[in-house]
Image (tube, grey):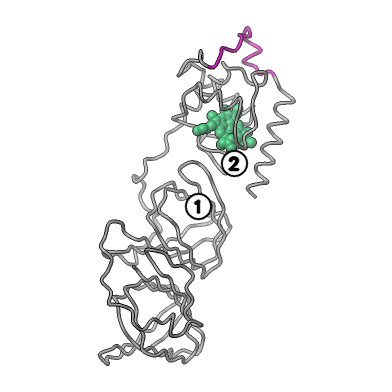
Amino acid sequence: MLMRARHIAVAVVAAALSVAPASDHAASQTPTPAPAPGQLPATPRGDGERGKALYSKNACYQCHNNEAQGGAAGPRLGPDPIPFQRFVAYVRAPRGEMPPYTVRVMSDPELADVYAFVQARPRPPALGSIPLLLSDVLEVDNAWVRARRVQQASHEISPLHEHPDSVIVYLTDARQRITGADGKAREVSHRAGDVAWNDAAAYAEENFSDQPIEMIVTELKTGVKPPTSSAVALDPVRLDPEHHLVPIENTRVRVLRTILEPHLKSPLHDHPHYVVVYLTALHTTMKLADGRLIDNPRRAGEVAWRDALRHETEQTGDTTAVEIQIEVK
Ligand code: HEC
């Protein structure tokens, strides 16, 4: 998809350049010899209106987007572009995937107009000033984690904002376009039940599909003392690796995918502090270390926090249940 967009964009550029090498602006002015790069002003006085037309005619928008805000195929250019000399130097001799524009195609005064247009673009909202998605529901909030239920309507865009280190549990299939602060975008695809780790970063998310997305986002708080879970002596991953998979492990979390077959009895085992996301309905009875029995009926998609505990469990349901456990280190 991304590659195709690039190819189309390049084709359009080529077409625009071959059909219209001289611009209206250049035609209406006496041609001026191009000054050496060193002689270009740092901030030229271009005409933003003409710049808008040139930006469109020369297909800059194909990769940098209509408002020069960047997109899948090129980074953000405005409203704070790099200094004009560097801007011109870059357009003449790009180093990456951008096609070069020679002086014959776009003169320096024309680039000054484009520069004025780019400078006048609206400023993106300040990071952190954006309220969380309205459809967010806070499921868990304690000293270590914040778990949110995030729903994104089809083609909804949640604007650029800071995300801490987090674990995402997808409750639905999801196809999203993630655009970083540098304007670079990537597409991610997940199936319902997948888990993913996201390093802290600022990014915007767009639901790229015709279906709504629902996910549980567990954010790890920064600068906090880790929970003092008692040592896990009876580790379910060691005791029963077949039913306790470890899709993610890093310095902050260990994530388990726990599969409970019907009427399965799990022997005594330990958990450190953790968030649990029930991917399916589940009904267990838990026998705690002190002998207390706890009835634990859950619906698919429920989320809970548990302090460290040692217990035995019995799956009382007739169908296989799956839960994701996000152990906090
Ligand atoms: C085919 C896609 C494409 C088109 C068309 C395109 N660019 Fe780019 N541009 C890019 C990409 C990708 C980059 C990032 C670096 C690279 O790969 O060259 C970039 C980088 C730049 C940069 C450097 C930004 C920085 O912060 O260093 C400038 C300036 C720029 N483009 C201006 C323009 C202008 C002006 C036009 C139209 C005359 C234009 N681009 C047309 C893809 C494009």
Q: Quadrant of ligand 1?
A: top right
Residue 189 relative to residue 286: left or right: right
Taking the spot 55% from the left edge, 63% from the top edge, the residue there is 190
Between 46 and 36, the residue placed more toward the observer is 36
Is residue 222 something one can see in this rendering?
yes
Going by the numbered disc 2, the residue's amino acid type is Ala
Q: Nearer the viewer, mark 2 or mark 1?
A: 2
Query: Residue 176 in the image: x percent, y percent?
Result: 54, 55
Q: Which residue is mark 2?
A: 73
Residue 156: mark: 1
Instruction: Identify which amino acid the numbered label 1 is placed on.
Output: Glu
The answer to whether residue 61 shows anywhere in this view is no
Q: Are marks 2 and 1 in contact (CB under 8 Å)?
A: no
Position of the C terminus by quadrant: bottom left
Quadrant in the rendering for residue 51: top right
Task: Label 1, secondary structure: give it.
Answer: loop
Q: Residue at x 57, y 44 (%)?
A: 72
Q: Is residue 40 left or right of residue 163?
A: right
Mark 2 is surrounded, within 10 Å at the Cα level, by few (under 14), some (14 to 19) or many (20 or more) other residues, namely many
Disc nearer the start of the sequence (2/1): 2
Magenta-drawn segment: 22-37
Element at badge 2? loop
Q: Is residue 15 left or right of residue 295?
A: right
Mark 2: C-beta under 8 Å from nearest atom of ligand 1: yes
Residue 59 % position (x, y): 63, 31
Q: CA distance from mark 2 to mark 1?
A: 20 Å
Q: Residue at x 66, y 12 (%)?
A: 27
Q: Is residue 174 left or right of residue 276?
A: right
Q: Residue at x 63, y 47 (%)?
A: 2
The magenta stretch spans residue 109? no
Q: Nearer the viewer, residue 286 or 271?
A: 271
